[in-house]
Image (tube, coloured by chain):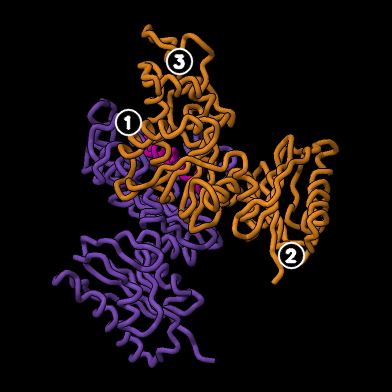
Chain colours: A orange, B purple
Amino acid sequence: MMEKYCFGVDLGGTTVKIGLFNPQGEVLEKWEIPTRTEDKGSHILPDIAAAVQTKMQEKSIEKEAVIGVGIGVPGPINDEGVIFKAVNLGWDVMNINEILGGLLGVPVKAGNDANVAALGEMWCGGGKGYENMVLVTLGTGVGGGIIINGSILTGSTGAGGEIGHIHMNDAEPDACGCGNHGCLEQYASATGIVRLAKRKLAVTTEETVLRNEEVTAKSVFDAVKAQDKVAIEIAEEFGSYLGKGLASIAAVVNPQVFVIGGGVSKAGTVIFDYVEKYYKQYVFPGCRNVDFKLATLGNDAGIFGAAKLVL
Amino acid sequence: MMEKYCFGVDLGGTTVKIGLFNPQGEVLEKWEIPTRTEDKGSHILPDIAAAVQTKMQEKSIEKEAVIGVGIGVPGPINDEGVIFKAVNLGWDVMNINEILGGLLGVPVKAGNDANVAALGEMWCGGGKGYENMVLVTLGTGVGGGIIINGSILTGSTGAGGEIGHIHMNDAEPDACGCGNHGCLEQYASATGIVRLAKRKLAVTTEETVLRNEEVTAKSVFDAVKAQDKVAIEIAEEFGSYLGKGLASIAAVVNPQVFVIGGGVSKAGTVIFDYVEKYYKQYVFPGCRNVDFKLATLGNDAGIFGAAKLVL
């Protein structure tokens, strides 16, 4: 019987990551090409097609042996593969499944990058063994991906899982990147934690190691681990916002597990100490028993999830 | 070709509503039987089976002509038909699909009553023509049902769409029925609106018709329609909580439409004047364009949705 393969593509603003997988979830090859955004991004999909075809030749993989090519893209995209806009790539509305599928002659399935990463974590990462999960990515912003019965919840305009923009605080004076005030991402992202820290440092006279160096999400949680009192207060505030936000999400989609990824999650399970406590305080009792896990695939979540899209 | 039929059953704490439908969504017969909760509710499913079988004989419908029997039940229930508990009915854990299916010899599919009502409104009611919708039921409490790509979002423990228990207010002194403080249902249900009204009346000296009679959700919105200033302030507060709550839901599941039902919705589209304004203020911009509709099936939403479960 012929061996089967699939490709997972993670399209970013500067590089395209590509993985060759077998259907069992093993990555056989992994490489990158640059994202050429010039000329309205018109080279991007042909470049990806060429990279996939070159790899197929190199490994003597026939077209018939390729189940398909999945691709995660940074923008809102519907279940048919239509991307509405991707400013970073210079793209306007187009159907990625049809264009890349036409270039390659194999089935192509596209999804939003955050949602695709969630699928990857479910397949082979922190969400392995679960079918109803929410991936919470705490990076520069707060992203999310929601998996229901093993499938991505895309939403009617591709904005499913935009959990960073749940409104949390009427009194927030600063604007979020989205233009609103008081979004979850303003408190629970890496930059949000720095904001909370700076506000705390401006009003407390308490001694803290956080005054000695540039404040980052990492330095806050390092100080928490060293029992720094001010850092712990900041972590409590972070946990209160994120725990409350996840409680709202649970009352809507009732997941089995929250998988926490992104730069902030590198602090480790210490963040759960602060998030779970507030989650349990605010959540609907029927949703209280949920697991908290760390994401494990890091930057590879996108290629794993993209490959899983076509399986 | 043989005519096909299906039955939709809405199991309540005091009565069971049953409808005989054709697959096009027309209700051919509609009747009720009492819910006998004695003996740990052990008569309920046999009573329903007997009622369905009697109707089949009366109308000379062969078993082969019955596509199935759908049933909405008041409690958390998973996709396999296992109900975890239904205190109102005296039931403990059991598989409704198997038991009622065994009694009838036709396929049976059970779902949570609020979720099933949402499916009914999508099939033949206010959500007709949409595939991604959230039903918001503003009654004694606030219930919800979420439909994604035409199917119910059940959740991992049957608590999907428990939107009445999204946390809204840290400063709420009163407890919600669920034991938490500050749930959406404490402000947006019929009883919630009365609470808001009483609080407002206690602190304002402004003249208002609301002092002349017993305050209800209906009397508040009647006064709003008559331009009563205090009633309008109460409606603003209601709209602010509900609009904000729906904005959180939209950032998670990104629906095309919110369908508003339950007793409070009898006030009509006037409630949208207060809800949409705050929704648009707080929602993630990518989810701003959503439709607001009134539910149209009233108490029949349950039998419609139950019938749709088996189609």
Q: Determine the main secondary structure of the stretch shown in magenta.
A: helix
Circle 1 is placed at which residue position? B170
Circle 3 is placed at which residue position? A199
Q: Position of residue A128 (x, y in %)?
A: 49, 52
Residue type at mark 1: give it: Asp
Which element carries disc 2, helix, strand or loop? Answer: helix
Above or below, A212 against B80 in this view is: above
In this rendering, the label closer to the viewer, 1 or 2: 2
The answer, for residue B90, to whether it is visible in the render is yes
User: Image check: B64 left or right of A72?
Assistant: left
Do marks 1 and 2 both belong to one polypeptide chain?
Answer: no
* Protein chain holding label 1: B
Residue type at mark 3: give it: Arg
User: Image check: B2 left or right of A42?
Assistant: left
In this rendering, the label closer to the viewer, 3 or 1: 3
Residue depicted at x 28% and y 51%? B140
Circle 2 is placed at which residue position? A65
Residue B147 magenta: no
Crowd rating for badge 3 (residues with CA inside 10 Å; few <14, some 14–19, many 20+): few
Give, as a single range, the part of the protein colored magenta: B235-253
Mark number, residue B222: none
Which element carries disc 1, helix, strand or loop? Answer: loop
Residue type at mark 2: give it: Ala
Q: Nearer the viewer, residue B234 or B74?
A: B74
Do marks 3 and 2 both belong to one polypeptide chain?
Answer: yes
